[in-house]
Image (cartoon, rainbow, N blue to C red):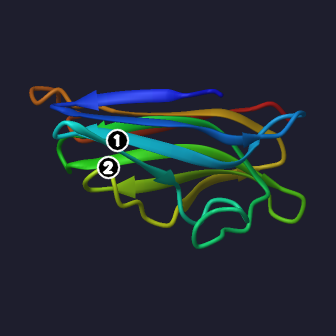
Amino acid sequence: VEPDTYTFGSTLVSAFQVGRYYDGGSTDVGWATYSGGSWHHGLLPGLTTNAPNPGSYDRATDPSVTYDRAHQIWMIATLAMSSTNGVAILVSQSADGLNWTQPVVAGTGPSLDKGWIACDDGTQSPYYGHCYLEWDDVS
């Protein structure tokens, strides 16, 4: 549910909800990477209490994937929610699309929704290598 996919070169990275709750969100965010003729997949670490290396959030949703060409980093932004930690936008990074870092908190608020991440990969752009993260604050 709510997948996003980004391709750079011969690598494709996709992120999506895993273990959907009936009233919204999921138990974790999965990823799948196709590169070199084969698929690899897993769960983002440190995101939810159900993740590998469990995080502190109960649910995750709205993943968004991008690649920062200038710094050669894949990123997945995710909306995370819990009754104790509230709502946050988290960003996980990977140099290869296979091994993902623990997420960092990019923003918090009582009523955030649908984050999106994108990078300026135009080598002639004055903003080459700048990445942008946005989200809705519906409070």
Q: Name the side, left or right, on which 27 lies relative to 120.
A: right
Q: In which quarter of the image is residue 95?
A: bottom left
Q: Which residue is drawn at 87% across and 65% down?
A: 84
- Residue at the front extreme, as displayed: 38
> Which picture quadrant has residue 18?
top right
Instruction: Please identify the quadrant where the C terminus is shown.
Output: top right
**Residue 19, image x, y percentages:** 73, 43
Q: Are marks 2 and 1 in contact (CB under 8 Å)?
A: yes
Foreground residue among 22 and 127: 22
Q: Which residue in the structure is indicated by mark 2?
A: 97
The image shows residue 1 at horizontal and vertical percentages of: 65, 28
Q: Helix, strand, or loop for circle 1?
A: strand
**Amino acid type of disc 1?**
Thr
Q: Earlier in the sequence, mark 2 or mark 1?
A: 1
Local crowd size for mark 2, using a 10 Å CA cut-off: few (<14), some (14–19), many (≥20): many
Q: In which quarter of the image is residue 52?
A: bottom right
Query: x, y percentage for residue 14?
Result: 43, 34
Q: Which residue is found at the position 62% from the left and 60% from the top?
A: 47
* Residue name at image x 15 percent, y 31 percent: 9
Give the number of marks.
2
Judge whether 96 appears above or below 123 on screen. below
Relative vertical location of residue 84 with respect to residue 62 in this rendering, above or below: below
- At which x and y percent is residue 64? 51, 35
Classify mark 1: residues with Cα within 10 Å, few (<14), some (14-19) or many (20+): many
In-image side of 75 versus 58 (left or right): left
On the rendered structure, is 32 left or right of 83? left
Residue at far bottom of view: 53
Amino acid residing under circle 2: Gly
Mark 2 vs mark 1, CA separation in Å: 6 Å
The residue that disc 1 covers is 33
Please tell me whether mark 2 or mark 1 is closer to you in this view. 1
139 with respect to 99 (left or right): right
